[in-house]
Image (cartoon, grey):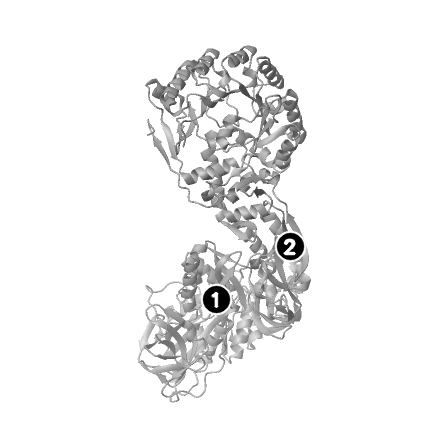
Amino acid sequence: MSLARIRNFSIIAHIDHGKSTLADRVIEITETLSGREMRDQVLDSMELERERGITIKAQAVRVAWKGFQLNLIDTPGHVDFTYEVSRALQACEGAVLLVDAAQGIQAQTIANAYLAIENNLEIVPVVNKIDLPQADPDAAAAELADLVGCDPGDVVRISAKSGSGVEAVLDAVVARVPPPGGDPAGPARALIFDSNYDQYRGVVAFVRAVDGVFSPGESLKTMATGTAFEAEELGFFSPEREPTRALSAGEVGYVITGLKDVSRLRVGDTITSETRPASEAVPGYKDVKPMVFAGLFPSDSDAYPELRDALARLKLNDASLTYEPETSQALGFGFRCGFLGLLHMDIVRERLEREFDLDLIVTAPNVAYQVTTKAGQEKEVHNPSEMPSDLLEVEEPYIRASVIVPKEYVGAVMELNQERRGDFHHMEYLSEDRVLIVYEIPLAEVVFDFYDQLKSRTRGYASFDYDLIGFRPGELVKLDIMLAGDPVDALSLVIHREKAYARGKALVERLRAEIPRQMFDVPVQATIGSRVIARETIKAKRKDVLAKCYGGDISRKRKLIEKQKEGKKRMRQLGSVEVPQEAFLAVLNLDGERKP
Amino acid sequence: MSDGVRHLYVHLPFCRHRCGYCDFVTVVGQDRHHAAYVDALLAELELERYRLLPRLETVFLGGGTPTLTRADELARLLAGLPPADEVTVEANPETVTSALAGLLRAAGVNRISLGAQSFQPELLAVLERRAQPEDVRRAFYHLRDAGFDNISLDLIYGIPGQRPDDIRRDLGEAVALGAEHLSCYELEAKPGTRFTRAHGDELARQADAMEGSFELVVDTLAAGYRWYETANFCRHPSGIDQRDLRARHNLAYWRGREYLGIGVGAVSTVAGRRWRNTPGLQRYLVALGAGEIPARDVELIDDATLAIERLMLGLRLDEPLDRRGLESAIDDEALERLSHLRLIVEDPAGHLTLTRRGRFLGGAVTTELMSEMPANTRVSTEVSTIG
């Protein structure tokens, strides 16, 4: 198809503003799927995506509209996947920016709009849910027009649920979004904007052909990572895979590579021909590094091999997940896993528990630290227990946090950010009532109970988004918890010096309350280096005897102690101290919830 | 194991009232069966007599309330039992008359275990005991008058509402009476008993406060008594004959000896087997009426299990426990840890003794010290015979 008849676009929106519903309507109106084949959230194939109403993997579908080929790329909306979103947007020339008529602009709306603008996309502003009783389409349209710099009259008003106005959206895409550029005769180049793993066919790359033509059977390679493979099959999405004879400049589709390892085909990389390679890659490739880390351990240590296999299976589909074996004295064998962010971590954990039926213990998440030792050595630390003691400087990741709230909560949001070592950046009124507040704040502070606090202090009105803005030095110390003189590795953490005392105190108090008394006094200490900053003592038991034992009940008493012995096996042995699993979990959960 | 069993337990289940905290096999309101029951006991004894030495070391009549058994039947029973060095009868204070004391003495009984429990009326009421404090004293003097010079008192502490001073007062009363032996038990609120349902919450509330009660008991008795077993105390050897006043029958249990038990619910452990007679009075009477062994649950006690039991029981005593033969039951690393914590001491000859603190923590120490092993004992029911 000629480039002039192609339009590539995404739908971008804050969560629950109706992205998937609009995608469903587009597929219906264009008769891409019959009524019988249709279902809700048709592009979200994962159980978890449907349940949570989120998109985790990018999906694409080709539809026909009034003689045009429209390629709709459905992107994950969450900040954890910003890089993936930006690559998906790069594959497009336009974006439908969708806003809920009742809620107006939310934090992700702004973040997505900026991403689209950075990628030079033509934005088609759309207000959705205009038929809701509490909808205020005029106000939402005004905010949207203000955000993207257009006339409020250019904002399309629809109800994706009823289908009203959806045709106008497609017409606007055709009219306003430019056709793809690119050189159909040049050396073939395609941008990888996502990939998945097909257990029969190997890695399937989702691509946007930029220049030239790709043919089945062709020898191909990636330009950044240099992975070579053969195009076993080419095709487009309808939304199931549909093989074609060629994938040409401007088109969106897939390449079946036969590769067995998804990490060899990175999102953002460029595919080109082995025989007639392009000289330059599509710009923008980044090696995305995980920023949030946590230890994942099976509750039942026998399940370690299952956890290992499950992580390997997830990794097939998720190149951004990293993991390496970790041994904890307290928790046994497990893996230190790296995630793009908290949602990513939560999704991985939930999939492990749900799809692989694993019962996991997750340690408190921490961020990546860049460390310089006094000896001048530099390294990145992903686990507080590996933090060297001779620290010269520690740098931690910072984010730019954007919070949108009704104006009466500005004080509450600022207070929370101040408590969390945030630096005020700026604030602006989006409308008379709603305010955007931007802070620069350490990611570590967001990892710890931030969402919960934000929600409760703003009665759920706040919307929140963030961008990573790099590493900055901080007054950080390593806080260790000692039980009877031995450090408990799983409880070590890196924390700002000023907060260490309160946190250490809370941890030792919780441990004292949770750990049953032993046969000896157990000091519980929080230490920084060799300095003890908080201390409690679990007093020794004074009495533990079986009151009486005579001929008639020897068997019963023996079974009783055998049962106690059996129970001890389920204890976590921390040095000389036995801690029931539940007690240990209670202490790990001192960090509160981790869910975004 | 031996050439013959030296210890005999005889169970007499009859009670006037079942106390709320009791979980022994007891029978209330079956007075008409006393004669038949004694017949059955003597019949069972005949069936098992081949296991016993002609003269025993100890005989123990427990219950129930043995002294509630009709006097003539009790005398007939005692006359039918084999002779023994120590013959103990459990007695409830309210049942002890001058006549009964004389009867027991005449029948060769030389030791009485008197269920005093407490000297405080309100605490006795909580325990649903029928005796009053003066009944305990009266019973004690009747026994003394009849010539008993080895009397043990049972005391219970940890009764809902009991304060440390109450414990001191009870111990003081027992000591003042001059009992040769004291058994001091913490009240066990066993799950499912009427007592636990009624008092469980109060017991849980006072659990922390009562933690020091055991120490209080031990310290209070330290002056005049030997703390020879976790819950048992006896006067130090005294008099010309330097009598050892420990309960010889119970020592046999704690030393892992074989014993034969007869009567409803009675337990025996002989030659690698442990069996428990049916707890049903009718079944018991019918079987022995027909000259048959009653229904029994049988448990095989293999060497490893026996070693565990000997460890568990032996550590209750103040005498050193010989490690030899117990290798399979002991976790050597745990022994080292426990030694380090000064809870246990091993002498060069390989004898283990708990320290004072180790004895207060005896249950936990035993669990720790015990090596891990699969529970390999089996329980089966054999209807009429043991091989």
- Residue A535 at what x, y percent from top left? 67, 53
Quarter where residue A492 is shown: bottom right
Q: Which residue is mark 2?
A: A525
Q: CA distance from mark 1 to mark 2?
A: 31 Å
Chain containing mark 2 = A
Could you tell me the amino acid type at mark 2?
Gln
Disc 1 or disc 2, which is closer to the eye? 2
- Residue B199 at what x, y percent from top left? 57, 31
- Seen at 41% across and 58% down, the residue is A356
Mark 2 surroundings within 10 Å by alpha-carbon count, few (fewer than 14), some (14 through 19), many (20 or more)? many
- Seen at 63% across and 53% down, the residue is A508
Q: Can residue B262 be seen in this snapshot?
A: yes
Could you tell me the amino acid type at mark 1?
Tyr
Quarter where residue A449 is shown: bottom right
- Residue B209 at what x, y percent from top left? 64, 36
In the rendered structure, the answer to whether residue B133 lies left or right of residue B49 reads: right
Chain containing mark 1 = A
Mark found first going from the N terminus, 1 or 2: 1
Q: Which residue is mark 1?
A: A323
Q: Relative to the observer, which residue lies in front, A444 or A386?
A: A386
Q: Relative to the observer, which residue lies in front, A12 or B129?
A: B129
- Seen at 47% across and 54% down, the residue is A299
Q: Which mark is residue B364?
A: none
The quadrant of the rendering that contains the C terminus of chain B is top left
